[in-house]
Image (cartoon, rainbow, N blue to C red):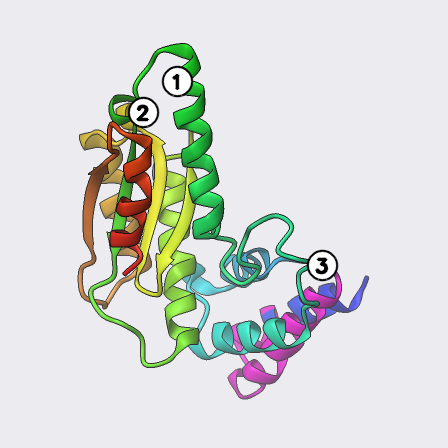
Amino acid sequence: MNDYDVATAAFARAVLGDRESLVDVALVVGASAASHGISLVEAIETMADLSPGREPPYVAVRSVVEAWTGSAPSPAADADCHDPLTALTSVPHLRTRLDDVYRQAGHRGWEPAVSHVLVVVELGRRGAHALEDDLWGLEVGHALAVAFPAHETVARLAPDRFTAFTHADDADAVGLAVLARLLREGLAGEPEPRVWVERLPVDADAVTWLLSRLTE
């Protein structure tokens, strides 16, 4: 049993009983997860699995995030184009995906403006600090990935704005209803986020303008 397993076992005991040690245990969970190459998302999911109702206390989640970010090695040139904290893709990576789709469409005779969309989620308010925004980002990213699981690219456009680049057929009434339910569950107690479907431009050159507007 490694130190991460020991820490998560201690968290399971603390969350059900000794709440006074919860923050200290959560700090060890975050630091040991980072040292073993375990993603922050996976560490928080483990905490949720060990918590009553899958709702780990906010102070524990915050401590795990602080310890993980303080212990995780710096990513090498952002090789996978993912934010190591939220696991969301970067805007440059999203732009690359868009460029790929437009290039393929040009060769194969279909129109990205018809086949694909961006489903955008904008939070109802900004957090008091960046860490709070990142925690909400985890919830929104998870909701988008679950609601649109087929070939989606989920990216963070701004501190309070997120998107899933997905097939237009998936962004129907059913997909949007699933997204709305997941957002209500994940952001319980927060103002309702704004959700809309952004159509892609016919001209590939207009993608730059679109992303500039969405990332303002």
Q: What residue did someone put label 2 on?
A: 112
N-terminal label among 3 and 2: 3
Give residue 179's mark. Answer: none
Residue bounds of the magenta highlight? 12-36
Q: How would you rate the neighbour count of disc 3 (Cα within 10 Å): few for under 14, some for 14-19, many for 20 or more?
A: few
Extreme residue in the bottom direction: 20
Residue at 44% in and 75% down: 131
Q: Amino acid at mark 1?
A: Gly
Labels 3 & 2 near each other (Cβ < 8 A): no
Residue at 69% in and 58% down: 76
Asked whether 215 or 49 is in front, the reply is 215
Q: Main secondary structure of the magenta part?
A: helix
Q: What residue did someone put label 1 on?
A: 106
Cα–Cα gap, marks 2 and 1: 9 Å
Residue at 20% in and 49% down: 195
Instruction: Give the side of residue 125 with respect to residue 130, left or right.
Output: left
Q: Amino acid at mark 2?
A: Pro
Instruction: Give the image location of residue 101, x and y in percent.
Output: 42, 27
Extreme residue in the right direction: 1
Which mark lies nearer to you, 1 or 3? 1
Above or below, comparing residue 157 to residue 52 in the picture: above
Q: Secondary structure at mark 2?
A: helix
Instruction: Give the image location of residue 47, x and y in percent.
Output: 54, 63
